[in-house]
Amino acid sequence: MTLLGSLALWLAFLLGIWAVVTGFAGGWKQRADLIQSSRHAVFAMCGALLAAVVSLEYALFQHDFNVEYVAAYTSRNLPIFYTWSALYAGQKGSLLFWASVLSIFASLAQVFTARRHRAYLPYVGAITSIVVTFFVSVMLFTANPFERLPYTPLDGRGLNPQLQNPGMVFHPPMLYLGYISITIPFAFAMAALITKRLDNDWLVAIRKWTLLSWLFLSVGIVLGMWWAYVELGWGGYWAWDPVENASFLPWLTMTAFLHSVMVQEKRGMLRKWNLALIIGSWLLSILGTFITRSGVISSVHSFTVSGIGPFFAVFLALAAAGSFGLYFYRINLLEAETKLESMVSREASFLFNNLLLVGIAFSVLWGTLFPILSEAVRGTKVTVGPPFFNQVNVPLGVALLLLTGIGPLIAWRRASLANLRRQFAVPTAAGVLTLLVLLVSGMRDAWAITAIAIGIFVLATIVQEFWRGTSARHRQYGEAYVLAVGRLIGRNRRRYGGYVVHLGIVMLFIAFTGMAFKRETQATLRPGESVTLRSPYGWTYTFTHLGISQYDALNREVTAGTVEIARDGKRIGLLTTEKRQHVDAFKRPTFEPSTAVGIRSDLREDIYIVLGGVVNGTEQAVYRFTINPLVWWVWYGGMVVALGGVIVMWPGGAPAVRRAQAGYAVKLVGKAS
Amino acid sequence: MGRREFLALGAGLLTVVPSSRRLAQQGQDSLPGTGQSGRLWDPDRAGRPLPPTTARDNDAYLQTIEKRLRCTCGCGLDVYTCRTTDFTCTTSPAMHKRVEALQDAGMNADQIIAAFVKENGESILMAPPKHGFNLAGYFVPSALILGAGILLTLALRRWTRTPAAASTGPTVASVGGSPEELARLQHELDQIDA
């Protein structure tokens, strides 16, 4: 099967080159036969790459340890769940995953693109094929997942214990899907530049793709936070690690695009900006893969380091030069159709929103790359950790949160004073009231207070919007309130789905403030001994060590500490936290012992217990006890963001959307004749 | 055979299965509340043996210092987070001991940090110190955003001063209707957009 896999990769490589050549030639010469041939080559390339994936999965499930990749990332006793996910656990497999998913997306773009956008397709096929061919060539020439060993080990090394977590089964594919799907909007943008069809047509063609990409990135990032929280054991979910930053960068620019594209659709403005954002987002997605995979910057998330860095660096440089070169060559065709009419308008607020989003992206990129810059300039490597990123980005994030409330409520073109008063009186009062309540209640963390107060302001704007829309439907059509809410969302999914996304963002921001009130302590306890810890809410938790048990599981030897928890003297339950020594099928240790955290989560706070180890081989255990306020809201905030994204993407017409697409070219009923 | 007998038989069989990893005789199990510490069946499974926690491990002042120092084991975490997370690491506990020793020698937080920088270079810090070239690290993003914000504001003011007639495009090009009807339409559109 590995021979089949290698042949499939070579076939995909040749088909990719063919798709590129015929795509460009067919589009340029307008030759239907070449265009058709390119299209078929894209499909065939997808088929070849899927055959390669099946071959690798077959080798993984057959425990063919003669294949270097299989021996490096699996073992005989690895659960099936993780044997499957080993496909993208390592460098070589994830390159194959990247290429095959992109080829699927490229094929879907060929099939599902509406007839009126078909003029772009030859170039879209060619550009996506360039990217796929690049990834296939990296595999063929430096990182072949089907490479064989000169001997066959009895068992494989197994999967890194930190990757043996359900979060890691779903988080990397989601993130990859996000990274990969940006290639389709990028290909359409390039096609629009090549064909000079730079009206709003290409934007309509990529709308679902941009949303899909943003949705995958959002879900992937939140799943990554969840994985870091439950698996790494440090008690947090975001550490401004280079790999985390790499996923955050395209999310920021895609979010900026999803806002600024509305200005182009409604007002014919920001055409240059939107194209630049799409190109930038795609380049950042490649940069993210480069950072994750090259090892140029050290990261706790980099589970593989190899020599593919130079390949990616060259590809990135060529892609940036080519795409921005074409962009500047066509820049004269990207003039705005209309001009801004007022500083106090939705367009202006979206511009500032974009400034902040791109500004945060720049500061994150700057901080991530600053160690390299410092080394190059001064010869001294510095560490840029959370204190730096928090200092630079927290104020920008809070300002962005404020604009989340302001932007959607200001009228297009020009907002009147009456409009502003009508929209913002109640939310501002809610925000100010929250601020006062927090100050009176004794909260003193300035950024936390500000973020919560602004969060409540934004929440009030969202509730107000839903209330007004629902009330209007109730009055006009006599609909029950629940039905009216449903129809309100259904009739304008883009607008109200967007509000749901904003609701999720508010939940996330308020949840982030919880980390300012984290409490923790270390303790060494004999069985029956207790330690107390006061929660930020004023409760006193008592943790009693009940004892240590040891047992064998499928691929690990477990040492589990059990702790009884009482809140203000009332027993609320037991938590178990484990030390795990992973072993292969012959009981040989495969990795350093890892930790499984015990977590009890509720709306207010998480109790987070880590078993550090034991003293002198006895049941006297060393624990770290942490109380993390509001963490629950991070996960559910993420789900609400995803729900909002799904609502926006959900197929179906909305009169307002269709009208928006048509701009303001409307005719009054009764006057047409 | 009943369930209890079956389980008892199973448990009995397990006790006679030899284990190459049984390194120590299992001691008396402890009971909750008695304070006794039984010996583990296989202590090696529990990772690196740890010393008991001391009061200084939870010292807030020392934690503040350790959160400014990077563990050099390659984890990328600060010393405090590493020593309370990856209990297999031997580097961060050693750095913790060093911080304690420097404090015992009469140094304050800044002096302890300076001592670490002298020994290991600036990369020992979790964030670059705010002087020299490092200032660029802190202020370039803010300065650029601020500069771009000012430029954007100036540009917006210039654009919005342009007479409304300059606002070309498809805005009302194909609308036919009386001024009252157009006004009503505009009002309705504003209502929807808002």
Image (cartoon, grey):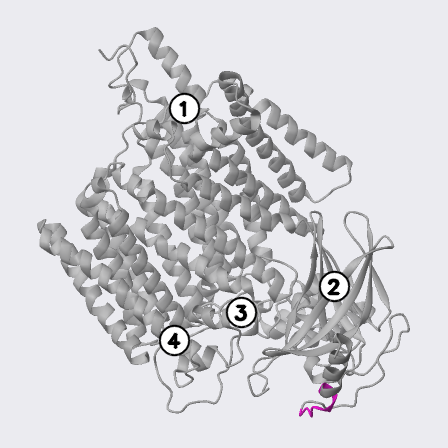
Q: CA distance from mark 1 to mark 2?
A: 58 Å
Q: CA distance from mark 1 to mark 3?
A: 52 Å
Query: Residue A203 colored magenta?
Result: no
- A524 or A484: nearer the viewer: A484
> Badge 3: few (under 14), some or many (20 or more) residues near its Cα, within 10 Å?
some
A628 versus A619 height, above or below: above
Q: Is residue A435 left or right of residue A194?
A: right
Residue located 36% across and 38% down the image: A261
Q: Inspect the image, locate mark 1, and give the three-letter code of the amino acid beneath it.
A: Ser
Query: Residue B17 colored magenta?
Result: yes
**Circle 1 residue:** A342
Q: CA distance from mark 4 to mark 1?
A: 62 Å
> Which element carries disc 2, helix, strand or loop?
strand
Q: CA distance from mark 3 to mark 4?
A: 20 Å
**Circle 2 residue:** A575
**Circle 4 residue:** A58
Q: Indicate which disc residue A391 carries.
A: none
**Circle 3 residue:** A163
| Residue A101 point in image, percent of width and height | 35, 60
Label whose residue precedes the other's in the sequence (1 or 2): 1
> Which element carries disc 4, helix, strand or loop?
helix
Q: Inspect the image, locate mark 4, and give the three-letter code of the amino acid beneath it.
A: Tyr
A515 versus A84 height, above or below: above
Q: Is residue B135 left or right of residue A550?
A: left
The residue lying furthest to the front in this view is B1
Q: Nearer the viewer, mark 4 or mark 1?
A: 4
Label whose residue precedes the other's in the sequence (2 or 3): 3
